[in-house]
Amino acid sequence: MAATDGVLLHLSAAPGTPSRPRTAQARRQAQATKRKRQATRAAPPAKRRNETSSLPAKKGAAKETARTLKGRAKKVLSAKKSSASASGRNQEQKPGIKTSSLFKNNPEIPELRRPVVKQVQEKVFSSEAFHELDLHPHLISTINTVLNMFHMTSVQKQSIPALLEGRDALVRSQTGSGKTLAYCIPVVQSLQAMKTKIQRNDGPYALVLVPTRELALQSFDTFQKLLKPFTWIVPGVLMGGEKKKSEKARLRKGINILISTPGRLVDHIKSTKNIHFSRIQWLVLDEADRILDLGFEKDITVILNAVNAESQKRQNVLLSATLTEGVTRLADISLHNPVSISVLDESHGQCELEDSVFLDASAPQPNDELDGFAVPEGLDQYVTLVPSKLRLVSLAAFLLQKCKFETDQKVIVFFSSCELVEFHYHLFLQTLLSGLGAPASGQPPSGCTRFRFLRLHGSMDQEERTAVFQEFSHSGTGVLFCTDVAARGLDLPQVTWIVQYNAPSSPAEYIHRIGRTARIGCRGSSLLVLAPSEAEYVNSLASHKINVSEMKMEEILSVLTRHDCFKGRRRGSQEAQAAGPQEIQERATILQTVFEDYVHSSEKTVSWAKRALQSFIRAYTTYPQELKHIFHVRALHLGHVAKSFGLRDAPRKLGVSAIKTRKANVKRPDLRRKTQRKHHLAELLRSEYSSGMEAGVARVRKQSKPAEPGSQPGP
């Protein structure tokens, strides 16, 4: 009981004021409890207690390390600062120029050894005048006043009298020598002189076949001018891209001189009831070699069979700039006892008219075609060797020189594909023309208003193609980017320069391209751009009696020093110095940077440049076997070629889409895949020149074809 009382006494005395002997002990216990609670509240886990014990030592070491790093950083920063100041001094000498390897690691430009050959030349004009011919006075007056022509060309002098006599003829003459008028004048003269006056509803009396839509429009325009005094004779044109319904309406009203492309005429023969050839008196095949090259031989056979079924007696004319085995075969089935008219240099002794049965047992050999290449007397031909990385800036510098620093220049630039035309057209339009390419002043060059860029290729709508053709024809200046759709037969007036940015696949194509200038006695020039690895192509041209002179790349690029738009900020003492090679390289690099900045401005433009690069590589693989040792895809440096498309690095996986396509089609039979590839190739070849109706016919066939049982839809 006493113990219990003691405990109760102790418990009751704890919270209050204890007895004097226990005061110090209680104070020590309270302090110990407080320290214990604080230690428990702030203590780290057991695993880190050892680390906590060494914290003060590590903290001191960290401070020492920080002091050491700080000292090193000061040294590094001071070093960077000094190097930056040094680079700043260099940038004062080379301002606004980004690091570029445009002039590094390029292949050496070989010395161009050009064999001296005597080139075949034609004398374009003769001394005979049109009034010396037995033509209607109104027709002679129209030729003199409307066409502004008084003297005949050599081919007209030989062709017109023979055709007025009613002879079939095979005419071979250089492009731009006036072959169109050589058959148009006899056709108009014979039709207006008919005893029974021609009525519109009589239908066609003359049928003219041409390979391209633009040439059809050009021939139609020539007939319209010649027929001004003879309004009762109605010309008409049929070509792809136009509405077939409106063409049928014109055929119902009546067309007396019918100009057409082969594919569209075959469509009308098969589907239009009111087309007939019972009164045909003239059949003309213009640019016959090109018609055959484009695969229209079957269409020509269909047309000839349709005409022969209704009209056996007529006059036939074949015109071509080159003589090939296909032209000979076509002449064999269409001409009767023809006269062969070939206009060459008088020194070769072949300027006289030869009456002969042209087609005998011996077909012309390839060497026969080579002897037929001739160029106008007023044409100067040049070639320049440019490394792949510098091709883009070289082309831009050349166009800048012609459009800004020279007057009355009209230039045609030939590319190998539609994608290349679109790429360069839009790139130059957005940089050279819009002023995006002015790094120094932010403004386009003052003379850039002379830049007038147009494009023409087979993937364009017919309405747009016609508008571009007409605009460039009637314009005194400008630059036309085009494919070979404009290489044959087109008479584009006052063209001063032809630039072949991609080398043609044959000497015949080369002749047709350069034939767009120096026409009808005018002067003109051509420039062929080759890579150093392609220099041997000059020897190939020389073997075909084509002589070219060399133009140095430095001469082309030097034009960049003539305008401040491509100059960085220089100090006054340096501005007066003459431009040297270093200055040319700096300005070329600035221009290249402008192109690269635009191409890399968005994913869309990068993808667009890659597609153009792919198109270039595909076209490069299509050179014929005899030129593979010059134009081989393995000789291309992909990184350097990519630079010419504004790409800073060679793109990877260029063929990914093709590989995926092949993997997706791996289950298809090989025969079917090969057939599809052939059809696709045929469509590509005909896309620029066909009637425009094949796509619709294909859709109709696809819809009408019954589905095979158990067949799966294609991917």
Image: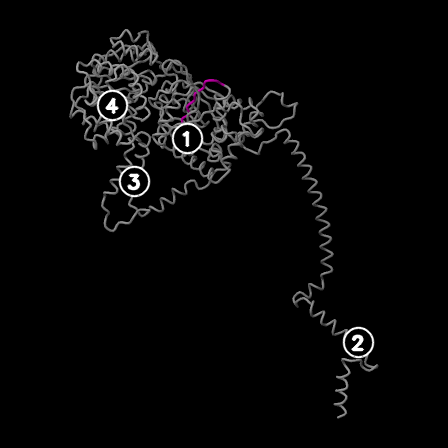
Q: Is residue 90 left or right of residue 657?
A: right
Q: Which residues are magenta?
A: 406-424
Look at the picture and state if 100 lies above or below 224: below
Residue 534: give x, y in percent of width and height. Answer: 43, 27
Give the amino acid at mark 1.
Answer: Val
**Lower position in the chain sequence, tag 3 or tag 2:** 2
Give the amino acid at mark 2.
Answer: Arg
Residue 390 among magenta residues: no
Residue, disc 2? 27
- Which secondary structure, mark 1? helix
CA separation in Å, label 3 and label 4: 35 Å
- Which secondary structure, mark 2? helix
Q: Nearer the viewer, residue 341 or 222?
A: 222
Closer to the eye: label 1 or 4: 4
Closer to the eye: label 4 or 2: 4
Residue, disc 3? 676
Give the amino acid at mark 3.
Answer: Gln
Residue 17: give x, y in percent of width and height. Answer: 80, 80
**Could you classify mark 3 by the number of other residues whose Cα lies within 10 Å: few (under 14), some (14-19), or many (20 or more)?**
few
**Lower position in the chain sequence, tag 4 or tag 2:** 2
**Lower position in the chain sequence, tag 1 or tag 2:** 2
Give the amino acid at mark 4.
Answer: Leu
| Residues at discs 1 and 4 in contact (Cβ within 8 Å) | no
Which residue lies at the image location 70% right of the left edge and 45% below the top edge? Answer: 73
Residue, disc 4? 258
